Amino acid sequence: MLARCYYRMLISLVFLLVLPTTCLGLLEGLYCGKQNCYDVLGVTRESTKSDIGKAYRILARKHHPDLHRTEEAKKEAEIQFKAIATAYEILKDDESRTDYDYMLDNPDEYYAHYYRYYRRRVAPKVDVRIVIVVTLTIISVIQYYSGWQRYDSAIKYFATVPKYRNKALEIAKDEINEKVNSRKGKNRLTKADQKEEIEKIIIKVIEEKMDVKGAYAKPTVWDVLWVQIIISPYTLAKWLCWNVSWIWRFNICKQPYGREEKLYLIRRYMKMGEHQFNSQEDKQIEEFLRLELWDKDNFEVWRLQEEEEMKKKMAENPRYKSYRRYMKNHGPGRMTFED
């Protein structure tokens, strides 16, 4: 009981100490503190921005610390000058002045005043829209550059594969003779230059003749994030129309599937992405169509057969046999130094 009385007395004392400033709409640590910003500049709430600027310049010249000689006068002028500068910073900005006026008119909402004040001080000065635009642009540039790096890596890899390399050499036979072998005398290339020139010709032929698909395909502007965001309404509308058309044609009207529809169902059953599925060889895709894997029952039979085939291959693999032998003798989770 006694503790409760002390608690009530403490609350009452705090309320009495805070009441004078909150009634005036002035809070310590916010804006001009216990001073009224309008009174500091000698203006009223009806004063225009021009009047406030004029009052600030007059007071700033009057109370500038450099205009006073003694150390005590300079310190006093510095305090006054800071108060004038603070008041001007608050009242010259329309949004800050609106928040300050709201605090004067609603002194009891002191928690909201603290939030408004520190939100404006802590919030970044840069427009969020600019940050988003710059971020999306950077991501798009990196995405496009990475796409070209992957494509170049794929082309260089195909240039090392004998099947593609020999085919490219056969196609570019005439060009190689003209640019490399036919040069005589001073124009004759060194062996290093000849090798470099032949590599360039092979890579050029592979780029022109080979259709690289999947994640390593040649990048286009349509693939970057910025363009995808811009055309997203069209993409969404196209997706909705496609689904409605699918339901109407195949679920309601029971129309037979076309080639694209069959490939879509096969890809969905295999749980592959579009790029991953398209990167497979044409012979493999034609085999999927021949086996009619767009039919769910046919796909399940094919999947079980593939799993059995994979188990047989693994059983015949020497490394897998060694692993099974180790697991049989030592069991899982056990580490030894035996050969």
Image: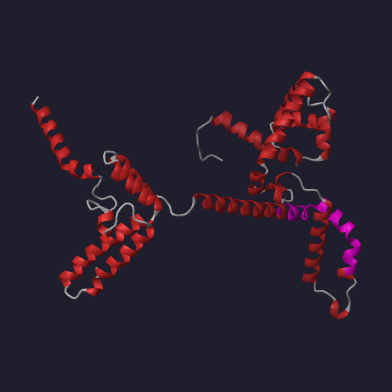
Q: Of helix, strand and loop, which mostly describes the magenta segment?
A: helix
Query: What span is colored magenta in the figure?
Result: 153-178
Residue 330 in sight from this viewpoint:
yes
Coloration mode: secondary structure
**In the displayed structure, would residue 103 be above or below residue 52?**
above
Residue lying at 77% horizontally and 48% vertically, measured from the top left: 212
User: Is 334 displayed left or right of 302 in the figure?
Assistant: left
Q: Is 50 a magenta residue?
A: no
Location of the C terminus (image quadrant): top right
Q: Residue furthest left?
A: 2
User: Is 310 displayed left or right of 137 in the figure?
Assistant: right
**In the displayed structure, would residue 192 be above or below residue 219?**
below
Q: Position of residue 211 (x, y in %)?
A: 80, 48
Residue 312 in sight from this viewpoint:
no
Residue lying at 89% horizontally and 57% vertically, measured from the top left: 171
- The image quarter in which residue 148 lies: bottom right
Residue lying at 65% horizontally and 53% vertically, measured from the top left: 146
Q: Nearer the viewer, residue 2 or 108?
A: 108
Q: Position of residue 161 (x, y in %)?
A: 78, 52
